[in-house]
Amino acid sequence: MGETTVTTREGRGPALRNPVAHGTGRAFLRRLRTPRRPRLWFEILLIAVSYWTYSLIRNAVPEQRGQALKNADWIWSVENHLGIAVEQSVNHAVNSVTWLIVGMNYYYATLHFVVTLGVLVWLYRSHPGRYAATRLVLFATTGVALVGYYLYPLAPPRLMNGGDFIDTVLVHQTWGSMASGDLKNMSNQYAAMPSMHIGWSLWCGLTIFALASVPWVRVLGLLYPALTLVVIVATANHFWLDAVGGMACLAFGFGVARVWYGALPYALPRVVAAGPRRRLRLRARRV
């Protein structure tokens, strides 16, 4: 199709773009990128659908057992070459203290979800202006992790051939991993790289450290991902390098939010002004 033309007194020429339509598109994009007060019903629905989709895609990734075991052997050899292959020593040492390893099993199974949801609720209530941008970081981090699961299947240390790692959930008969025991058929066992336990816990820790006003709470925020790193190694669910992959995914998530909102989430206003419709409703309630 050719370019649209119009006829004027001076002759035929190219038609000018409609400035109203162009301005409307810009205004619409600007509204999308402007922080707004979150709506509770929408956020609950969005988080539920997003997690369901994440679980569906993660578990739909083909379990490439042979390739996953080869990749695990390669990761283990690289760590030995770098002198950081301490996972087996940590796994055996912590496993010898029953109360400690049992606690770590339950930590691995529960806090990953509980703390993340708790931080989202806290953001929604106390930092509504930063909520959407910070949530976008979490979603982008998780989304790119799905690509990693598909492109790089990786067996966790406890499933390595001849690795002499202890599956602490099976040994102590605790519910500590969706990839062990009777729950193993509900989860892709070869989706260890990147570690979203690290990605999510570091997201929680940085958010708490950046926005909390109480000093000891900020310290706890930093301790949470550090302790999570010890837990994923002690329970033989991840290598150290899986944690590096989780950090890289989180960096990508922050980059997406920075590009979309023009600033890091924590630099945005804590509270956003109510829109025209909300102001009218508030006035009506006062009347």
Image (cartoon, rainbow, N blue to C red):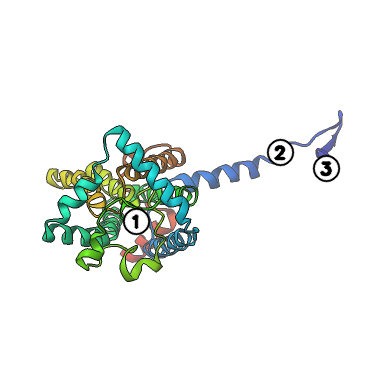
The three-letter amino acid code for the residue at tag 2 is Arg
For the C terminus, give its image quadrant: bottom left
Above-or-below relation of 48 to 37: below
Above-or-below relation of 186 to 200: below
The answer to whether residue 7 is seen in the rendering is yes
- Whichever of callouts 2 and 3 sits on the residue coming sooner in the sequence is 3
Q: Residue visible at 48% across and 60% down?
A: 57
Query: Which residue lies most toward the top here?
Result: 10
As rendered, which of 240 and 280 lies closer to the eye? 240
Mark 2 lies on a secondary structure that is loop
Task: Mark 1 vs mark 2: give the one in front.
Answer: 1
Q: Do the residues labelled 2 and 3 touch (CB within 8 Å)?
A: no
The residue beneath circle 2 is 17
Q: Where is residue 81 in the image (x, y as percent from the top left)?
A: 32, 33
Query: Which residue lies most toward the front here?
Result: 162
Q: Residue visible at 37% across and 42% down?
A: 75
For the N terminus, give its image quadrant: top right
The residue beneath circle 1 is 159
Few, some or many residues within 10 Å of mark 1 (<14, 14–19, 20+):
many
- Whichever of callouts 1 and 3 sits on the residue coming sooner in the sequence is 3
Q: How far apart are marks 1 and 3 (CA)?
A: 60 Å
Q: Distance between the residues labelled 2 and 3?
A: 16 Å
Task: Mark 2 vs mark 3: give the one in front.
Answer: 3
Q: Position of residue 223 (x, y in %)?
A: 18, 45
Task: Mark 1 vs mark 3: give the one in front.
Answer: 1
Query: Which residue lies most toward the bottom here?
Result: 182
The three-letter amino acid code for the residue at tag 3 is Met
Q: Where is residue 206 in the image (x, y as percent from the top left)?
A: 27, 43
The answer to whether residue 227 is seen in the rendering is no
As rendered, which of 32 and 158 lies closer to the eye? 158
The residue beneath circle 3 is 1
Few, some or many residues within 10 Å of mark 3 (<14, 14–19, 20+):
few
